Image (spheres, helix red, strand yellow):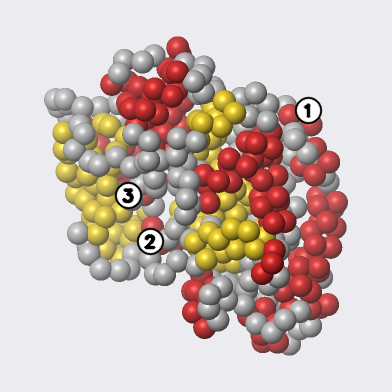
Amino acid sequence: MGRGQMLEPAIEAASRDELRTLQEARLSAQIARCAASPGIYRSRLDSVGAEPEDIRSLEDLERLPVLTKEDLRDDQLRHPPFGTFVVADPAEFRELHPSTGTTGMPVSTIWSAADVETIASVTARTLWQFGVRPGDVIQNAFAYGLWVAGLSVHYGAARIGCLVVPTGTTTPTARQVEFLRATGSTVLLATPSYGLHIAEALDEDSVDPASLPLRIGCFGGEAGAENPSTRAKLEAGLGIDAFDYYGLAEVGPTFASECEAKAGIHVAEDYVVVECLDAETRQPLPEGELGVLVFTHLTREASPVIRYWSNDYARLSTERCACGRTHLRAVDGIVGRHDDLVVFRGAKFYPSQVEKVVRSFAELSDEFRIEVDAGGGTLVERCTVVCEVRGEQDGVEQQLRQALRTELGVTPELRLGPYGSLERSTFKAQRIVRV
Ligand SMILES: [Zn+2]
């Protein structure tokens, strides 16, 4: 490990002081750009009695209110088609990407020509961090189209100098397997759920993953690859080293990713400022405490976000990583989304905890659902975990109930179906089902 493994060592291994200086210079310029015209950012500065030149340091940034997805949506509805948070010259607009959230109207973000370049270079850095090198054959099973992941990794792979096989998510899984065998793909990109589904298909075809040239898996779009039992299944089932990365439609397709040390996801701090805030008070938390991540774009030109409330929970650490990178890490990856929190009989848990338990059982398939009461809200009165059993497995139900109770602190109801009874996803799997 070390600088030789980095695509941009001057940035990736810059000292914390150098990083702060770079961030604050970029922040000042970004705030000035955002405040130059009347709109959401100018009025937010006014609301706290600040002029653009008052926001120079990372501490100054904390004076501004957080920005939620609802704020962006309202701004876009009031000022169609793109809202006042889009601050670039329309002549520079190149791509539109809507959010992929499951609730409410999507929010459109715009990438300018310069944004496309920045996104390609940050994505190339991510892929390089996973060990992707010129000459790799990349099978891109991320959705192309109205989801940012497919196109951005396509651009990033081109930067590095790779051959891309753009299978996307509409290619049937059997053909994905054919491509893995016939084209000699060395890298697979997919959501973790789709990666597991492809691994199942290899197993059903009796293909030994060791016989394939595949060596790296890049997983994003949903949490999972950092979950130890999911990672183990992806690595064994596909014969790969599996890596996790994180992105958000409003912030960027990827800006936080694992390194070869697999010790959390490094946030690209030359690209965004990340803060970790208390979910209730919205005040900064001490390093290492679990809170909501909040992002500020430093270089985004067309639709920058300033203090964007991600709704995603993580713990941050600036402790030096074994890989030599200095950019801070979310040490356990993204622990959970606020929207996915289940509160049941006084216990609070995330689907990722159920996933960890289910995937630690060899007798169960990788698929599961958490059925909760219909209606909104996190507080539920009924909660059933639905899984699939391979063949006859006496005693598994009892062991599963015990393992869930240990992990969650509460015992949900269980329903075990036969193998193959739950639908497989090629996109983001919906783990919580309201019934
Ligand atoms: Zn590292």
Kindly state the secondary structure of the residue where label 2 is placed: loop
Which is nearer the N-term, disc 2 or disc 3? 2
Near mark 3 (Cα within 10 A), the count class, few <14, some 14-19 or many ≥20, is some
Q: Residue at x 51, y 19 (%)?
A: 184
- Separation of disc 3 and disc 1 at Cα? 40 Å
Which is nearer the N-term, disc 3 or disc 1? 1
Q: 174 or 316, which lies in front?
A: 174
Would you say the residues marked 2 and 3 are in contact, meaning their CB atoms lie under 8 Å apart?
no
Would you say the residues marked 3 and 1 are in contact, meaning their CB atoms lie under 8 Å apart?
no
Q: Residue 147 in the image: x percent, y percent?
A: 48, 52
Q: Quadrant of residue 394?
A: top left
Q: Residue at x 73, y 29 (%)?
A: 5
Which residue is labeled 2 in the image?
102
Q: Which mark is residue 431?
A: 3
Position of residue 302 relative to residue 4, above or below, is: below
Q: Amino acid at mark 2?
A: Thr
